[in-house]
Image: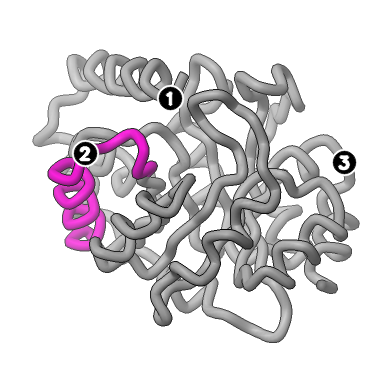
Amino acid sequence: MLAELTANAVADALARREGRPLAEVEAAALARPPALDALAALAPADHVKVIAEIKRSSPSRGSLASISDPAALARSYELGGASAISVLTEGRKFGGSLADLEAVRAAVSLPVLRKDFIATPYQVLEARAAGADLVLLIVAALDDAQLAELFALITDLGMTALVETHGADELDRAAQLGARLIGVNARDLSTFELDRDLFARLADRFPDDAIRVAESAVLSADDVAHYRRSGADVVLVGEALVTGDPIANLSAFLAV
């Protein structure tokens, strides 16, 4: 599934490139104001921090929420105390778009993450051109050369890479890369099975200077507390926020 999602995302980017050449996207990216400091926004604190996600659907859960106004939802997240906003821009399975990212960027003052299946420099430049401050890199989808190239480009553009891992070897690769923001996704993107205890098993492998992000399997404050006890600085939450009251849920999560 991960290979298919990545291949489709790359194919869709190539199609967009036909209408918007690399040079044009690069110029737009370089013309953007400097990216916001996501590492400062997500730095460890007395309470857990939340990256709140704009997410309409997923391959594992199907349709979650229509989200006709992603900017309005992002403003609710900001009002509720989120530290950053994640925007799914993959269109085929998640119902997202770069237009969603642009709308959210214009609506909030928080760092914004482009969450997609990124495998080419063009996609990174698209992210900055649309106003992203962070870009997701999924270690399992990239070889070492791709990972290093994309990480360097994200950094050179002033953005922050959220480097997502699903196991010990992948977390070690993220550490060797020099990543400062590292996530552990409880959902295996090949099988879509969940393992809420994966983060705890990998917690000791994080570099000392890395911000620790727990992703997926967050439906309640108890789930957040479970991750916090395991050492998470940040949780990334989508489904629980788009299917419930975002402000009330954020309030409960941030009390952990």
Q: Is residue 58 left or right of residue 117?
A: right
Quarter of the view holding residue 242: top right
Residue 108 appears in the rendering: no
Q: Secondary structure at mark 2?
A: loop
Q: Main secondary structure of the magenta part?
A: helix
Residue type, numbered disc 3: Gly
- Helix, strand or loop for disc 3: loop
Q: State the separation of the CA atoms marked 2 and 3.
A: 37 Å
Classify mark 2: residues with Cα within 10 Å, few (<14), some (14-19) or many (20+): few
Identify the residue under disc 3: 244
Does residue 141 show up magenta in the picture?
Answer: yes
* The one of 124 and 36 positioned closer to us in this rendering: 124
Distance (Cα) linking label 1 and label 2: 14 Å
Q: Nearer the viewer, residue 167 or 108?
A: 167
Q: Amino acid at mark 2?
A: Asp
Pointer 2: what residue?
Answer: 143
Q: Secondary structure at mark 1?
A: helix
Above or below, comparing residue 119 to residue 16 in the picture: below
Q: Position of residue 91 (x, y in %)?
A: 49, 20
* Residue occupied by mark 1: 2
Give the alpha-carbon distance from disc 1 to disc 3, as whole Å.
28 Å
- Segment tinted magenta in the rendering: 138-157
Earlier-in-chain disc, 1 versus 2: 1
- Report if residue 113 lies within the magenta region: no
Crowd class of label 1 (few under 14; some 14 to 19; many from 20; radius 10 Å): some
Image depth: mark 2 or mark 3 in front = 2
